[in-house]
Image: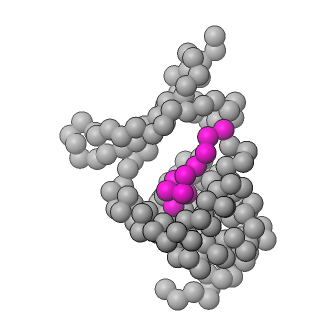
Amino acid sequence: MRWFRSRLICRLLGHKWSPWQRENSWGNKTEFLHRHCLRHGCLATEKKTQISHMTIASPNRLSNPEGRAWLRAALKTVNAPLPSEATPEDMVNCVLMDHHDISSALLVAALIDEVPGRTLANIVSKNVFSYNELNIAMERIRSVGVDVTNTENGKWINEMAGFEMA
């Protein structure tokens, strides 16, 4: 039986992951989330820091039922090739928070590159995201090696962000 310690290899092989579980650090100063690979014999784990203000911002952005519906429609396209589905809250976290892991970068890239422009425009019009927030997320994922700035939607988001008021 082969086992892997790298979460990247587990993702490439399409292993299933457990749901995120909350834990506190030793001094209860920070809260983080962790999950592990479910394949028998695999030791890969993943951990991310839970930022408290994001848990407040996410429900506010998804409180509009029309905005939530448009984001769920976009997630049908994003989730199609993935072994585990991302929720609307996951997508809001990936776009707004400063994550530097490949899985968050791939979710943001799929949102920008694969979702039709009309759907993205509806998501922005329902105040789930702004063009500036999408543009910042697009620039952030470049540091991980995922570049969608030259795609049709990437250029359009960059242009629209230039028109938005701060």
Residue at the farthest right position:
152
Asked whether residue 10 is in view, the answer is: no
* Residue interval drawn in magenta: 83-92
Name the residue located 67 percent from the left edge and 49 percent from the top edge: 79
Residue 14 pos. (x, y %)? 68, 32
**Image quadrant assignment for residue 51:** bottom left
Viewer-proximal residue, 129 or 26?
129
Q: Is residue 125 above or below residue 148?
A: below
Name the residue located 55 percent from the left edge and 33 percent from the top edge: 17
Q: Answer whether residue 84 is magenta in the image.
A: yes
Residue 47 pos. (x, y %)? 44, 39
Residue at the farthest left position:
27
Residue at the farthest top position:
1
Q: How many marks?
A: 0
Q: Is residue 80 above or below residue 118?
A: above
Asked whether residue 13 is in view, the answer is: yes
Name the residue located 73 percent from the left edge and 74 percent from the top edge: 118
Residue 136 pos. (x, y %)? 56, 70
Residue 49 pos. (x, y %)? 39, 47
Viewer-proximal residue, 151 or 70?
70
Report the side of 22 relative to 129 (left or right). left
Quadrant in which the N terminus appears: top right
Name the residue located 68 percent from the left edge and 54 percent from the top edge: 76
Q: How is the image coloured?
A: one colour
Q: Answer whether residue 51 is magenta in the image.
A: no
